[in-house]
Amino acid sequence: MKILLAVGALLALGMQAGELPQGVTRSTGVDAGSGIAYVLISVEGKSLGGTVAPAPRLTAQCTRGPGGKLKFELLADLGGVSGIAYYPPWKPTSDELFPPRLGKEQVTMEFLGYTKVKPVKRQWDDLLEIPGEMRYATPGMSSANMEQIMFYLQYLRPLPTLRLTVPGKGAAEWDTANWQKVVHAEPLCAASGL
């Protein structure tokens, strides 16, 4: 049933199964070590501080653990990051008992469309595996954020342009309308709430 809904959503976009809107990419796989199935759905954006190659990217990282639990995370880079890959969650080992400390960024998030809402500042984590890539920080002991990212995805429905500004690093903007439709059509991304 979910596959039929996904194909129906793609056809509603005017695409055949397997086709994606311009600027949107999708990669899938299963991590051999953890057994986590993943899909990464990215959309290219534009740098607001000049030309940066490669272009800024906003990525939905959707996963299903071996127990069947779905998880949604939002990643972003402001440009200049050449590639993206899935990295499984950190697990303690005999050599590393504590998780690595991630850099924190206070990112201003703006949602633009037919109207404007007040910008919000939220914490994003710098990823160690891909320098320049950030992930919206999940609320908890190591994060000042109070809301899950799914809360802000609801803002994107009527206000599809997302602008992120990182002090001292720049700003980028994405038109997320087609990206949202692809995320919505992906069964593994059901936790996004789109």
Image (cartoon, helix red, strand yellow):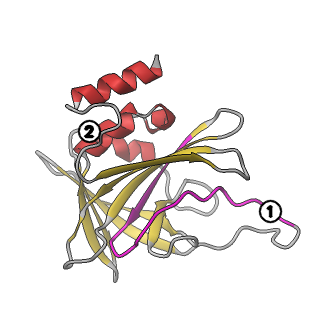
Q: Observer-nearest residue: 28 or 181?
A: 28
| Residue occupying the point 29% across, 42% down | 20
Q: Earlier in the sequence, mark 2 or mark 1?
A: 1
The image position of residue 34, as x and y in percent, is 72, 49
- Quick check: 73 above or below 144? above
Query: Is residue 25 at all visible to an observer of this figure?
Result: yes
Q: Amino acid at mark 1?
A: Pro
SS assignment at label 1:
loop
Q: Observer-nearest residue: 55 or 149?
A: 55
Q: Observer-nearest residue: 121 or 153?
A: 153
SS assignment at label 2:
loop
Per the image, is 76 magenta? yes
Give, as a single range, the part of the protein colored magenta.
71-93
The image position of residue 33, as x and y in percent, is 73, 53
Q: Within 10 Å of the Cα at label 1, are there few (<14), some (14-19), or many (20+) other Cα atoms? A: few
Q: Which residue is mark 2?
A: 157
Instruction: Residue at the far top: name it.
Output: 1
- Which dot marks residue 92? 1
The image position of residue 115, as x and y in percent, is 12, 47
Locate the C terminus by quadrant: top left
Residue 180, image quadrant: top left
The image position of residue 152, as x and y in percent, is 37, 47
Q: Is residue 90 left or right of residue 144?
A: right
| Residue occupying the point 40% across, 19% down | 4
| Residue occupying the point 49% across, 57% down | 145
Distance between mark 2 and mark 1 Cα atoms: 38 Å
Q: Amino acid at mark 2?
A: Arg
Q: Is residue 11 left or right of residue 2?
A: left
Residue 50, image quadrant: bottom left
